[in-house]
Amino acid sequence: MPELPEITIIAKQMNKELAGKRITEIEATQPKNLNIPILDFKKKSYGKVVVNISNRGKWIFIKLDPAYYMLINLGMGAEILYFASDHKRSEKYQFKLTFSDKTGFTIHFWWFGYVHLIPESDLKTHKLTANLGMSPTEETFTLQYFQKLLTHKRVAVKNFLTNQKNISGIGNVYVQDILFKAKLHPNRKISDLSEKEIRDLYSAIINVLNRSIRLGGLAYERDFYGRRGKLTVNKFLVGYKTGKPCPICGTLIKKIKTGSTHSYVCPKCQLP
Ligand SMILES: [Zn+2]
């Protein structure tokens, strides 16, 4: 399942390819992915021009002119693929968008996923995106912002980091190495963290996510051009490495249950 690095990479590639282009055709075969009826969706999209494309967490925001947004969520690993001309496109898709120059993209949904079209004025009340926390890839996600965000929070650090209302984009894959790098056990309470631990946690978030972006994301996910990332499981520090030695102290990595998810920890470096 894609997390913040993968979606950030795709949004950047989409912005590079699609900004300034005019929508001329929409094909959608799965009404459940859309927020409005297909005909309505087509009518409202036609002729609109892409202003820019960005992401917050796992949501892709296509800003359109005049004054609309197309919001895309790939759910459990849907594939969104660019095509330079119609005969070069992917065969498998439930959604296809074509521009006036005949380029475009397809989306092949796996489980759930969304393509919502909303007027810009409804952005603040769009249920699925309005309450998303800031992403660590956003410029305004500073240490100062992070310190403030953690003030008076009493929940376990892992639950806090993976709750999309606090921070959007961190899931069960990247949180493992983030906590290891910060030397924090997933069950540590936010209110018990020292100032130094909070600073280390902030650096760990930025480092782990940026490293993945540099590597093109996870090796089992594809980007907008269908290329796989270079971040393979053997490049993780502790994540999914049960029984392997900790890269710092050599103690064997343990898989433990933390609430409804699993965590991978070094029992010596990450004390409860
Ligand atoms: Zn260790």
Image (spheres, rainbow, N blue to C red):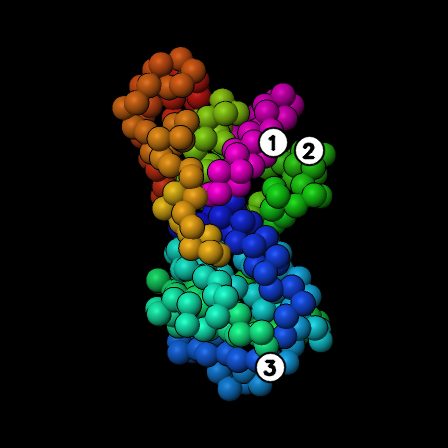
Secondary element type, mark 3: loop
Q: Main secondary structure of the magenta part?
A: helix
Residue type at mark 3: give it. Tyr
Q: Residue furthest top?
A: 249
Distance between the alpha carbons at the discs numbered 1 and 2 = 6 Å
Given contact means CB atoms under 8 Å apart, are the residues at marks 1 and 2 in contact? yes
Lower sequence index among marks 1 and 3: 3
Residue position for label 2: 143
Residue position for label 3: 46
36 and 84: which one is in front?
84
Which class describes the residues within 10 Å of circle 3: few (<14), some (14-19), or many (20+)? Answer: some
Q: Is residue 166 above or below residue 110?
A: above
Residue position for label 1: 202
Q: Is residue 73 left or right of residue 108?
A: right
Select label 2 or label 3 by which is in front: 3
Can I make out residue 162 in this image?
Answer: no
Region rendered in magenta: 189-218
Which class describes the residues within 10 Å of circle 1: few (<14), some (14-19), or many (20+)? Answer: many
190 and 83: which one is in front?
83
Identify the residue at horizontal 71%, vertical 75% (top origin). 66
Secondary element type, mark 2: helix
Q: Is residue 3 above or below residue 258?
A: below
Identify the residue at horizontal 32%, vertical 25% (top origin). 254
Q: Is residue 67 above or below residue 243?
A: below
Residue type at mark 1: give it. Tyr
Identify the residue at horizontal 58%, vertical 74% (top origin). 101
Q: Quadrant of the C terminus?
A: top left
Lower sequence index among marks 2 and 3: 3
